[in-house]
Image (spheres, grey):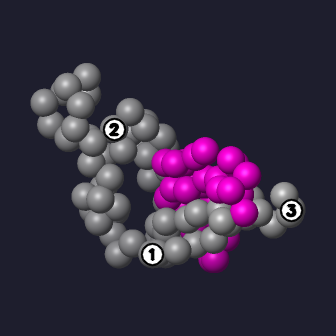
Amino acid sequence: MSPDALKHNFQRRFNSIEEVEAENMVSDERLGSKPVPFGFSHGLWCQLLSKMQPGDELWTFSTSEESWANMSGRAGISLVRNEKEIDCIIQKMN
């Protein structure tokens, strides 16, 4: 696998925290009667939000097709500041 295979490729910028949460609501009786943003990863989401500063952006990301083909793919949500990733939540991996 090439060294670049695990680099994140930003795919889509969200317009707001509310938009991210709306697209990532999880319903599970173990979490209670109401859906929870990011479900069992809600604590990680809150940690990510605590790092946000004015001007920061939230983006979806994925590693390369090569990484997925080699069973090391990752995808999720990144906190981006000045075009650099500050932190992320991994939502999918193989």
Question: Mostly what secondary structure, the magenta segment?
Answer: strand
C-beta proximity under 8 Å, tags 2 and 1:
no
**Residue bearing the label numbered 1:** 13
Looking at this view, name the residue that lies furthest to the front: 69
Q: Which residues are magenta?
A: 66-94
Q: 89 or 68: which is nearer to us?
A: 68
Q: Position of residue 66 (x, y in %)?
A: 72, 63
Circle 2 residues within 10 Å: few <14, some 14–19, many ≥20: some
Q: Which residue is mark 3?
A: 3
Q: Which mark is residue 39?
A: 2
Q: x, y percentage for residue 13?
A: 45, 75
Quadrant of the snapshot with the N terminus: bottom right
Q: Is residue 78 above or below residue 93?
A: below
Pick the front one: 38 or 50: 38
Q: Quadrant of residue 9?
A: bottom right
Q: Earlier in the sequence, mark 3 or mark 1?
A: 3
What amino acid is labelled 3 in the image?
Answer: Pro
* Rendered residue at 86%/62% (across/down): 3
**Which structural element holds mark 3?**
helix
Q: Is residue 50 visible?
A: no
Closest to the camera, between mark 3 and mark 1, is 3
